[in-house]
Image (cartoon, grey):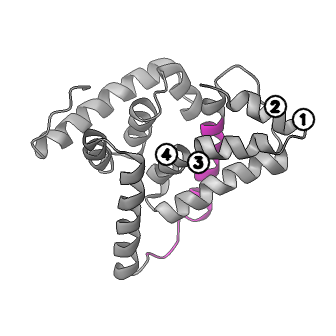
Amino acid sequence: MDNGASSYRRFLDGDESGIVEIIRDYKDGLMLYLNGFVQNIHTAEDLMEDTFVRLVAKRPKFSARYSFKTWLYTIGRNVAIDYLRHNSKMLPASGEELQREKSEEAGLEQSYLREEQKILLHGAMGRLKLEYRQVLYLSFFEDFDNAQIAAVMKKSKRQIENLMYRAKMSLKSELEKEGFVYEGL
């Protein structure tokens, strides 16, 4: 389904509908991936928009070394890391605001993650370390293989294999606490 590359090429050639297709196809998954970094769906939405703005404004060169989706998620990851680096000393929001954001976030997640198993899995993943959430999200929800995950996370394939094993063990422990066993682990 990797028509993102052809849509991006069309966009670079002047066809504005190419970027519209990219945004339509990748916005939801990218936003949820970025939410794993910032734990705030509104901030994740802003970072997702910043990622697409970067595509439009800077028009970076895409090479077919990786899939378009891998390349796009790598750009999104870099945007999220830059955001975290610059905003690490932000003041926490009020309790009421956090509760409202959590309920909005849950609604958005549930609309994207339709299957009950994936909703439970996503909730348990939220309690894991950032690296574990990141590697599991890319594998379970975006169907990335280890090579693609390694490219996004800027690690070796072997590091990803080790990280994936530790993340799955940690997730399995979290799920067992809830009395749930996920067959994919």
Question: What label does residue 13 carry, if any?
Answer: 1
What's the residue type where badge 1 is placed? Asp
Q: Where is residue 164 in the image (x, y as percent from the top left)?
A: 37, 27
Circle 2 sits in a helix, a strand or a loop, which is it?
helix
Disc 2 vs disc 1: Cβ atoms closer than 8 Å? yes
Q: Residues within 10 Å of mark 4 (few under 14, many from 20)?
A: many
Would you say residue 61 is visible in this rendering?
A: no
The answer to whether residue 137 of the structure is visible from this angle is: yes
| Residue 57 percent location from the top left of the image | 83, 51
Q: Nearer the viewer, mark 4 or mark 2?
A: 2
Residue 115, placed above or below residue 166: below
Query: Disc 3 designates what residue?
Result: 27
The answer to which of marks 1 and 4 sits earlier in the sequence is: 1
Q: Give the range drawn in magenta.
A: 72-92
Q: Distance between the residues labelled 3 and 1?
A: 22 Å
Residue indicated by mark 2: 9
Task: Report which residue position mark 4 lands on.
Answer: 33
The amino acid marked with disc number 3 is Lys
